[in-house]
Every structure is written in structure tokens, then in C-alpha cells.
Amino acid sequence: MRVLICGGGVIGTSIAWFLAMRGAEPIVIERTGVANAASGKSGGFLALDWCDGMALAPLARRSFALHASLAEEIADDWGYRHLVTYGGHAGARTRRGRALAWLADDFAVTQRLGSTETTAQVHPGRFTAAMMRAAEAKGAALRPGRVTGLARQGRRVTGVTADGGTIEGDAVVIAMGPWSILAGHWLPLPAVYGLKGHSLVFDTGTSVPAEALFAEYREPTGALSTPEVFPRDDGTTYVCAISSDTPLPVDPANVAPDPGAIERLEGICRRLSPVLAKAKVLAAQACYRPVTQDGLPLLGRVAGLDNAYVATGHSVWGILNAPATGEAIAELILDGTARSVDLLPFDPARLPPLDAKSLHIGA
């Protein structure tokens, strides 16, 4: 069975892996490169139980377990390791709390949010690329191209149009992150929005141990920021903060930080940690995470069509939930139902389809 997967991010490559493991022929069609957008510029933080009590809980728990098994099963290295995760406040000299050696003196750690049993990490770009390589080793293919439409015969999709030609397939999956909104021209899909975030990657060597941090920081302007800090096994430390609703550009290659956002984030990092203040900045970047109207991903068959599927809208949990998404979508396509996770809460039909006439994103 040939399955065309539109999008070479972590969701698309994970679907390709699980399809290839079942003997299908997935073809990932990607316009700008594997992990070129949020899948290569996010934190890669994994949590077992942070979605407990929500509809996402079964997906997150299954995916957390799959991350551990994939690290054993696939002969590649994407920086998978367990973390201790803390929360705390900057400007907290009068607060009671423990200190971490790499943080500023006026930062107090007030709680432990996760242990090595409940929180972990991957390098997201390396993980995404490794999943694609592993899928290719099992018969998947990566094809450069920009998908611009679908070929249909009644209720069945027979392929996609890309770069002026047609690629034929037995099923199609839309997994283009926030750019899945473009498929609203071709399919009755609910709206997907892009939430922009900014991040820095520092060269910190061995100065920061495997301790993730979720912080609250009051900037000199009075604005409250919530930076997230993730040291990685390759001697780098990733810090993200400062979200915005800047319009999504049509081309992912045109994503750029908002004016002043990187300078603002650098200022936060300097005051947060003397280690970060002295470290070289290796990357200053921005990316858009896909979000939906109700905050839950769109996972399942597209209404009115027999063989069109969508997998997007994971918001900040895309890296975490990619393996379980890939497994469940592969089951849905090949078996007609997902056995590993109940996808009903994520059925795209729960939300009204986007009016394509109102579709507008940035230049």
C-alpha cells in the first residue's frame, strides 16, 4: 500500500516509520527539508504524566513508553536521556527553595516537577531525521516537493499534485504542522493555527547537568516570562520563551524571529544564569507550533473521503506525542481502526471545517 505523507516533520516521519514496519510503502513529500520547522527547533522535552486528567493522557503515556523503546530498537543516536525537572522563580532571594549551581544566586528552585522516571528528552531534529532514515531503511522514500492539491475520483483520493506533477498513492496523510491549514483549500479540515515561539541554543559544555527547568521571570519592563531550559547531551543548552501571534508565512523557509525578541530572550538568559551569560550562542531562531481551536490535535480520517487522513495540531507536545501518533495513524490506515490509542477524542470531525475563502496567512 502506497501512502503519501505530506510533511517531513516529526509527525510525518513517525507515521512513515510505523507504516514501513508494517510493510507499507510510505512516501514523505517535504518542500524545505526534514525537521526544517518546529521539529528541528523545539525543546524535545518528554513527560510521562503531565497530560494526566486530559484527553491527551493515553496518547502521551503510550508515546513516552515508545520513546524509550525506539531508543533501544533503532541503531541511531538522538540524545535520548532521562532528566530531573525543576520549577522556580527568578528574583527570589526572599523565597525559600533550593539552589542549582548553574543558576543565578537570586533564583530559587521551589519544586521538583519530574524525576528521571517521568521526564526525559530527545534532540528533536536528530530524532526526526533518525526516524526518516530508519523508515527509509525499511522501504520508505523521501521526495522533495511542494504539495499544492489532490487528485480525486469521487470519495477516493488517488494522489497529490506537487511541483506541477501528480504523485499517485492509495492514501494521503496531511501532516504539515501549522501549514496543514493550506490543505483547507483541498479538504474539509478544521482550522490549524501557528503559535510562534523563540529560542536560543547555547554552547555550555559540561557546565549544565541533566536538569530541565521551567522558570518564572519578571523582566525589567514588568512582563512575566516563563523560560524553559533544556540542557542536552551534546553540550548545548536550549532555552525558549516569548510567544507571539505573528502571521504564519506561506513558505516555512521564511520563518524568522520577531524584531527584538532574540535580544529580549538573551537578556532573560543572562540574568537567569551566569553560565548562559558567558556561553556562546549557537542558534537564535523561531518556529511555529500547530494549535487547534480546542487545543487537541487533529488525528484521523478526513470526513467525506475514504482514504484521506490528517495528523497535526499537537501544540507543544509534538515531539512527545509523535511516536504514538505514528503508530495509531498507521493502524488506522492499514487496519481500519487504531488499537494502540483511542483516536475518537481527536477526530477532525469534532470541529467545523475551515471556510477556505477566509484562509489567509502571511506572505
Image (cartoon, grey):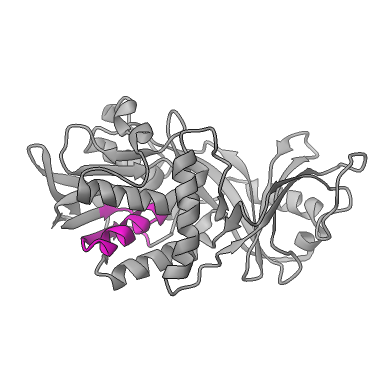
Instruction: Tell which residue pokes out farthest to the left in this image.
Output: 153
Residue 152, image quadrant:
top left
Question: The N terminus appears in which quarter of the rendering?
Answer: bottom left
**Rendering coords of residue 222 (x, y %):** 78, 33
Up/down of 152 relative to 161, above or below:
above
Residue 208: x and y, percent?
74, 64
Front-most of residues 340 and 200? 340
Residue 285: in magenta span: no
Q: Which residues are magenta?
A: 5-33
The image shows residue 79, relative to residue 271, as above or below, that is below
Question: Relative to 241, is 121 above or below?
Answer: below
Q: Residue at x 63, y 68 (%)?
A: 233
- Where in the figure is residue 17, as x and y percent of width and height? 33, 61
Residue at 37% x, 35% y is 346
Identify the residue shown where x is 33% and y is 31%: 190
User: Compared to 149, does 129 lie above or below?
Assistant: below
**Residue at 44% over, 35% down:** 296
**Does 21 appear in magenta?**
yes
Q: Tell which of 241 and 229 is nearer to you.
A: 229
Is residue 62 toward the left or the right of residue 359 in the image? right
Question: Quadrant location of the C terminus?
Answer: top left
Q: Position of residue 307 (x, y in %)?
A: 17, 44
Q: Is any part of residue 51 visible from this angle?
A: yes
The mark total stands at 0
Q: Residue furthest top?
A: 352
In front of the other: 108 or 334? 334
Q: Quadrant of residue 212?
A: bottom right
